[in-house]
Each structure stands twice: as structure tokens, then as C-alpha cells.
Amino acid sequence: MAEFLMEDGEMAQPENVRLSEDGKAVVILDQTQLPNVTEFLTLDTPKKMYDAIFELQVRGAPAIGICAGYCMYVLSGQIAEETKDYEGFLAKFREQKEYLNSSRPTAVNLSWALNRMENTVVANKERSVEEIVEILGAEAKEIQAEDQRMCRAISEYGLSLIKDGDGILTHCNAGPLATSSYGTALGPLFLGKERGMNFHVFSDETRPLLQGARLTSYELQKAGIDVTLICDNMASIVMKNGWVQACFVGCDRVAANGDAANKIGTSGVAILAKYYGIPFYVLGPTSTIDMNCKTGADIKIELRNPDEIKKKFYEKPMALEEVKCYNPAFDVTDHELIAGIITEKGICRAPYTESLVKLFED
Ligand code: MRU
């Protein structure tokens, strides 16, 4: 396994998403095969790119956005080989953009990054198509670099909320694999580790796709952070035992009123935390806040294949083929359950309708 998490106590850059050497493809670490196999995939066609996002080979809201930026750069190079005419280029660019945008609906970082790339094309319409492609490459790199800076800042703010020795419960995976480095919900734990602090982390396994078991416990264990893997239905008992001082989770889309969509099961954790008097924090970059969504009711929840529940990680099917399944990939945590939303610009507290607006004022 690539030792990409800690080198000499420092966070190393995880190469979960990057451009190929010749710039003609996007290379991703296939997260569906972790923790058993480390395989990198080369994405050089729209279909491969769409499938990689849809199949969660690249996943986690910020990482999806970073990947989408690089994908549009690679595709723009291909389009430029066919047409040097700006209008023709833009039309084809938009077609590919819409195709990638349809791969997953909930994480706003996907459309956010795609729109940013399109805006870059439009803002440079006086330039040649070749120049536009070059500028798009720089923009994609900047999306990734910005995410690194945002994760680092989120980690600092998150760390200020916990103390050495605390127990932290997390759900799904919001670590380096899901971002560019550090992660969001896991960032404070990695940063604390660098500073000699120790936390006890409870990682929900996160049914049905097991991001907590396969990715979070893997990332933390590799980094030498004390992690205990639990089934999702064990969160209550570890809270009741007094082992959890805070919950840290990531987010896929935060509405203007603070309602936050994250991996299915997150809202249940928040409800339990409220019952046991444990602060529940949502950590994410401002690129995950969608001020166009008034409340969580406006967030589209992705529905996925029932086989993920019945078959995906089992040798034999775990239910009769004909049994009905409901498989929403995300749920929305009500803003009233959230003690704080931690962004790279600071910690927002209720009322979120005011504190989130302030984030975007400067
Ligand atoms: O379906 P996934 O694995 O892409 O869902 C990921 C999550 O829900 C993460 O918590 C979220 O994207 C934040 S990642 C920093």
C-alpha cells in the first residue's frame, strides 16, 4: 500500500486524484478496492470518468469536485483537437459537463467545480481555444490546491474544539481520500496527531458501502491514530458509555439554513448525540455550502442500486432477490441538531441563516 498518509509526522499528499504525466488523462486511486488492493485507474474518456464517479471509485464531495475539474481539462484538450472554433468548443464542453454532472446528484462540489470550469471558458472567450485549454489546466490545479488550504484551515478550527484524549465518533469517510489532504471531519485528528495529541476515534462502519470500515479505519490506523471500528447500530452504546466527547462528520451539501446532507445514517448519529448531550459538528469547505438551497428539503438525495444492500460485499446474497430495498445514499441532518458548522473561514453557529450568509460576505 502506498504510504501516503504520514511521512516523518507530516501529512503527505495522497494521490487520490491527479493528472497523468502527459496531461491527457486523470489518474485516480480506486477507492472501491481499498483496503485490500491499491490500484490506480486511468480516466481518458467521458464514459470512464462518469463511471468512476458513479461507482464511487473516486468519492467524497471535495474529491469528486477535484476530479471533475481535471476531467474537464482533459476533455477540453480532446475537444480542442476537433474544433478551434470557440462556439463549437463551448457547445461540446457544455455537453460533456452536463454528462459528468448527471453522475451523482447530492454532493454540490461536483456541479460547483464543473460550473467553475465553464465560467473559466466563458471568461476567456477572446482567447484561442488552445489558450483556453491551458487556462483550464491551471484552474483545475487551483481547485485542488484551494481544497488543500481549506482542509488545513478546517482542521485547525476543528482541533480548537477538542482536547487531548477525547473520544470522537465519525460516520462515513471525510479524510484525505475524500479530499486533497487532511480531510474535513478527520482533518483535526490528523493535525492533532502531528502535534502529539491523541484521540480515540470510533468509526461507524457505514452501511451499505462501508466507507467507515474500508476507508476511515484504514486511514486512521495507517496514521497511528487510535481507531475502533463499530457497526452503525453501536453508536448509541459507545455514547452511553461516555466514550464520545464530540461527533465530527463531513457533508455533501449544506443548505442556507444549516441543514446538512451527508452519508446515510448521519442524521441518526446527530439524534443520538443530542440525546446524550454530545456536540455534533459538521465540517466542510465553503464549496459544499449551497446558498441556493433554502433548506434540506431542497437537497436531492441519491437513490442507489438495491444490490449494494443485498449483495455488494458478500460472497452470497444476503436477502432474497425479490425483496424490496430502499437505498438512499444520503440523509439530511436538521440544523437544530448541529452544534457548529466548521469551514475554512471559521466556525458557524446557530442561527445558521445568519452565520452562513456572513461567510460569503467577504
Ligand atoms: O457516497 P460517498 O462515499 O461519496 O459519501 C461521502 C460522504 O458522505 C462524505 O462524508 C462527504 O462527501 C464529505 S467528504 C469530505
Image (spheres, rainbow, N blue to C red):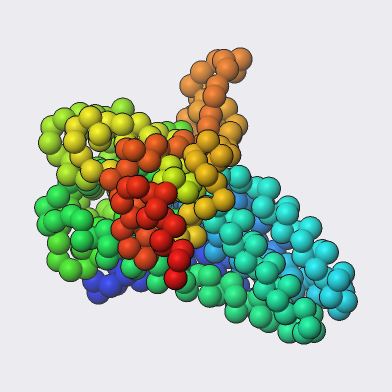
Q: Where residue 277 sits in the image (x, y, percent)?
A: 19, 36
Viewer-side residue, 27 vs 187: 187
Residue closer to the observer: 338 or 228: 338
Q: Position of residue 245 (x, y in %)?
A: 17, 44
Instruction: Tell whether 137 sits left or right of 80.
Output: left
Residue 79 can be seen, yes or no: yes
Task: Identify the image quadrant of the C terminus.
Answer: bottom left
* Closer to the camera in the image, 243 or 254: 254
**Residue placed at 23% from the left, 43% from the top?**
279
Q: Residue furthest front?
A: 354
Q: Position of 285 compared to 52: left or right?
A: left
Q: Position of residue 133 (x, y in %)?
A: 72, 78
Quarter of the image for residue 114 reads bottom right
**Residue at horizontal 33%, vertical 55%?**
348
Q: Quadrant of residue 152?
A: bottom left
User: Which residue appears at 65% of the width and 47% of the height?
Assistant: 103
Q: Quadrant of residue 260?
A: top left
Quarter holding the N terminus is bottom left
Q: Looking at the image, is 172 positioned above or below residue 155? A: above
Answer yes or no: is residue 183 visible: no
| Residue at point 47%, 30% (across, down) | 314
The correct choice, above or below, for 362 with respect to 279 in the image is below
Residue 253 placement (x, y as % from top left):
49, 48
Is residue 68 rendered to the left or right of residue 283? right
